[in-house]
């Protein structure tokens, strides 16, 4: 009987580690949600988050500088074109929230928003 | 010389600068000798004696806004000019609280719109016009065009014993005043006694009126903290395209209706959408306010009473007369 060699076992062991909760190096890292900003909307335009669960909102602008603001969610960020801005959010209460662009970006700026629903 | 006494000041000029587009500032009556002495001391401190006067607030003319958004164009603005010119007593001063023009990215267009604004405003037969920018005037270029046309976006001046402070909460693109302007405000106010009447005029609300509609200033609390030692502060602002009256910490904040289009009541709807234009009533929900000073509750004090004025089309005013356009304030 031939036993498997070490370099054959390593990938298998790695796969087992990743599949086992608690053993994965990424198990506790917050989920990343990609959000793009482009005059005059955020995409996606709606999010559902869980109360108490941190998420990273990876913000990118496809054109000009935008803002990303919600006082109740503790968000106050600027999204500059050409670089991603990661914002970690941990909602503390259920409900509906509105995140707005608060960096004047043109005539349609006033209605540029993203709706966040926080559930249990 | 003994320092200015707070009680003396209140007897002479106890006033609460209040609501609306038209303000009447009237020192309460007192013994002429004492009044003269206090006025002289105030003049020495403020640079000008307290004397009665009237002023007007106009806001959000949005010159150049597309017809889809503002079907009435500059009609309301032009009508407001005629209305102001017909006021008696005639106001000394008109304050414009921002969004004089609607933004444009077409080269040369912002300057053209600003020139059109100036052309209409020059029709006002008023001694002094003062302006602050709105985000549509200054949000895209940091206030460069505004400064070229009008000068500094934040400044202060005294008029008949009242200290006026123009604050800019739009040029940084975000709704904020910023640390440099806060420091300037602190230094500017440091030379005044706590009883000095102060009128702050700016574009956005300095409190959280409706943050989801960007009706706030993020460092508004810091501004109000700088103003907190002062007992007679009134804040006038625009931006929200509807009248509003808010009192906090003894300060009255008054929003003017616009001279372009109106927004709905934020308590009644989630959508910040312009109210529909009615060609039969083109100035519905637009306009300005008259304010009358009258006897106060305490002897020798003055109060301010607002009174709404609707703009009307000249051809419809007919035999109605100006007085019939007045109705009691709903505030």
Image (spheres, grey):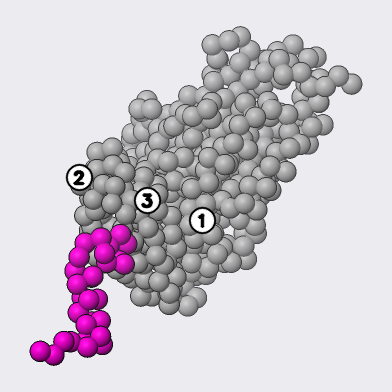
Depth-wise, is mark 3 or mark 2 nearer the camera?
Answer: 2
Distance CA(mark 2)–CA(mark 1): 38 Å
Distance CA(mark 3)–CA(mark 1): 18 Å
N-term mark: 3 or 2: 3
Residue B130, compared with residue B318, is above or below; it is below
Tags 2 and 1 on a common chain: no
Let me know if residue B261 appears in the view: no
Give residue B132's position: percent from left, percent from top.
Answer: 56, 52
Residue position marked by numbered label 3 in the rendering: A70
Give residue A39's position: percent from left, percent from top.
Answer: 34, 69
Depth-wise, is mark 3 or mark 1 nearer the camera?
Answer: 3
Which label sits on residue B170? Answer: 1
The secondary structure type at the circle numbered 2 is: loop
Residue position marked by numbered label 2 in the rendering: A120
Q: Check the residue under mark 2 and report the chain it is in.
A: A
| B3 falls in the magenta region | no
């Amino acid at each position: 009987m031939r036993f498997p060699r070490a370099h054959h076992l390593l990938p298998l062991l790695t796969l087992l580690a990743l599949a086992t909760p608690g053993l994965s190096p990424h198990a506790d890292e917050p989920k990343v949600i990609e959000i793009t900003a482009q005059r005059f909307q955020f995409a996606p335009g709606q999010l559902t988050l869980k109360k108490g669960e941190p998420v990273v909102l990876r913000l990118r602008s496809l054109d000009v500088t935008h803002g990303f603001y919600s006082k109740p969610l503790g968000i106050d960020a600027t999204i500059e074109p050409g670089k991603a801005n990661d914002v970690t959010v941990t909602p503390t209460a259920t409900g509906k929230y509105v995140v707005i662009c608060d960096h004047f970006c043109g005539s349609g700026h006033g209605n540029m928003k993203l709706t966040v629903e926080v559930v249990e | 010389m003994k320092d200015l006494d707070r009680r003396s000041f209140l007897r002479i000029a106890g006033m609460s600068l209040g609501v609306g587009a038209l303000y009447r500032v009237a020192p309460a009556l007192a013994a002429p000798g004492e009044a003269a002495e206090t006025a002289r001391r105030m003049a020495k401190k403020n640079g000008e004696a307290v004397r009665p006067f009237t002023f007007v607030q106009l806001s959000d003319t949005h010159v150049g806004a597309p017809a889809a958004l503002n079907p009435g164009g500059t009609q309301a603005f032009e009508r407001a000019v005629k209305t102001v010119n017909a006021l008696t007593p005639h106001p000394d001063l008109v304050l414009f609280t921002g969004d004089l023009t609607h933004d444009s990215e077409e080269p040369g267009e912002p300057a053209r719109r600003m020139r059109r604004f100036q052309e209409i405003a020059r029709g006002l037969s008023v001694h002094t016009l003062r302006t602050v920018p709105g985000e549509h005037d200054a949000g895209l270029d940091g206030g460069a065009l505004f400064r070229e046309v009008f000068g500094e976006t934040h400044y202060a001046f005294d008029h008949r014993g009242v200290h006026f402070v123009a604050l800019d909460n739009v040029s940084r693109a975000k709704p904020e005043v910023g640390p440099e302007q806060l420091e300037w405000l602190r230094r500017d106010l440091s030379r005044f006694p706590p009883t000095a009447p102060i009128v702050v005029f700016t574009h956005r609300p300095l409190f959280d009126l409706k943050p989801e509609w960007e009706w706030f200033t993020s460092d508004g609390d810091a501004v109000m903290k700088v103003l907190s030692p002062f007992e007679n502060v009134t804040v006038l602002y625009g931006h929200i395209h509807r009248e509003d009256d808010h009192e906090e910490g003894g300060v009255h904040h008054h929003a003017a209706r616009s001279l372009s289009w109106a927004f709905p009541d934020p308590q009644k709807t989630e959508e910040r959408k312009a109210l529909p234009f009615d060609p039969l009533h083109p100035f519905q929900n637009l306009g300005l306010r008259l304010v009358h000073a009258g006897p106060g509750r305490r002897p020798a004090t003055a109060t301010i009473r607002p009174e709404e004025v609707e703009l009307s089309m000249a051809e419809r005013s007919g035999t109605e007369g100006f007085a019939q356009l007045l109705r009691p304030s709903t505030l």
